[in-house]
Image (cartoon, rainbow, N blue to C red):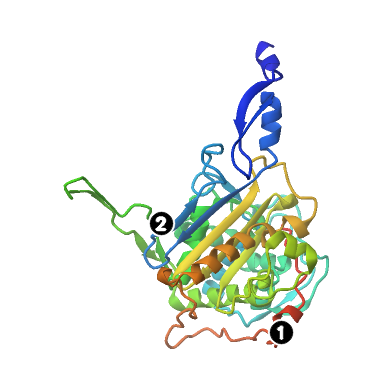
Amino acid sequence: EQIKKSFDVKTKMSVFTWKGEKDTIMTPKDSIIYYKHFLQTGVMAMEPQTGYVKVWVGGINYKHFQYDHVGQGARQVGSTFKPFVYATAIEQLKMSPCDSIYDSPFTMPKGRYGIDADWTPKNSSGNYRGLVTLKSALANSINTVSAKLMDKVGPHAVVDLTKKLGVSSNIPERPAIALGAVEITVSDMVAAYSTFANQGVYMKPQVITKIEDKNGVVLYESIPESKDVLSKDVSYAIIKLLEGVTESGSGARLRYGSGGPTYKRVTGLPYAFLNPIAGKTGTSQNNSDGWFIGMVPNLAMGVWVGNEDRSAHFKSTQMGQGATMALPIWGLFMKKCYADDKLNVSQKPFERPANLSIKVDCWAPKKVADSTAVEEPTTEEFDF
């Protein structure tokens, strides 16, 4: 009882604000409520070819928030999980980004893959597009297509691939994982995506390469850990799928300056990137977690944004989706990278494998003279 009362006693304290620390007087209970108002973020960038970690931001302020949202905190990944399903299908079923599949109502019957009831995933819009290519389906994050691909390959194969890609989370072998109902760390997601950019070779992230004493004696030197996971052709096919997301899908605002006053206010548009970018947005249930993972040939970067209290969320997907919460951090960071030539961050296309055996050139985004005239895609992600 005495402990409870102490939470209502006004106390002098220094609290975090976006304008710097502020000395104030409040009760411990009020301070807890105050801190729950802040959105947190986890950001990691690595070089796919070496595993060298270039950026690791575990939170918005280390002094006041010491929980690491990159390597420690695992959060629901939403649609950023879908490329693992597509990769499994392309590898095992010999599919290509240009193959077509029906976006139509779909029910997986009770008992299949051990589910205890019929499973009928729905698209966030409630609409169905009919026959679509895999590239269009991923660009628009169509849930029914991900579910149908999961039905074809089975959850065991998808989970097996994620483990090979370095994901350490315990992922249940259930069909619903196709829509991202799993919790994974930012570091694991960035390393997994980097495998696609590194032609199918997984590189374990390295934060420290060498430690020397004051006399130059090497006390520690890391040994790169790598393994072949996917073929060059399959990896490149996934890269082309992910490029579709930023060409005409939920990540297209990286290129176009439209989206209306709401998006301009919350995202800092325009970014107006012209170079190839492979990426995927993700939004968890109830708009609690927003993700964006984006890659250029020599840099992969993942961003998560959300509240430490998982029950806190945005009321609308428009405000709470990954394209609104997480993508702007990626966009602003990359603009600064490209402004500094010394960083040598690539703006070139991803390397195309010689004698590519998978068809990847399905369609090209519509070119316009004035990018500000392009209507922002209305596709929203809301994965159940």
Extreme right residue here?
126
Q: Badge 2 is on which residue?
A: 205
Q: CA distance from mark 2 to mark 1?
A: 40 Å
Q: Amino acid at mark 1?
A: Asp
Residue 20 visible: yes
- Residue positioned 81% across, 65% down in the render: 125
Mark nearer the viewer, 2 or 1: 1
In the foreground, 33 or 24: 24
Which residue in the rendered view is the most extreme toward the top? 2
Q: Position of residue 292 (x, y in %)?
A: 61, 61
Residue displayed at 59% across by 66% down: 331
- Res. 370 mark: 1
Quadrant of the rendering where the N terminus is positioned? top right
Crowding at label 2, few (<14), some or many (≥20) Cα neighbours within 10 Å?
A: many
Quadrant of the image for the C terminus? bottom right
Q: Is 224 displayed left or right of 41 in the figure?
A: left
Q: Which mark is residue 141?
A: none
Residue count near mark 1 (Cα–Cα under 10 Å), binned few <14, some 14–19, many ≥20: few
* Residue drawn at x 75%, y 57% as measured from the top left: 319
Foreground residue among 25 and 235: 25
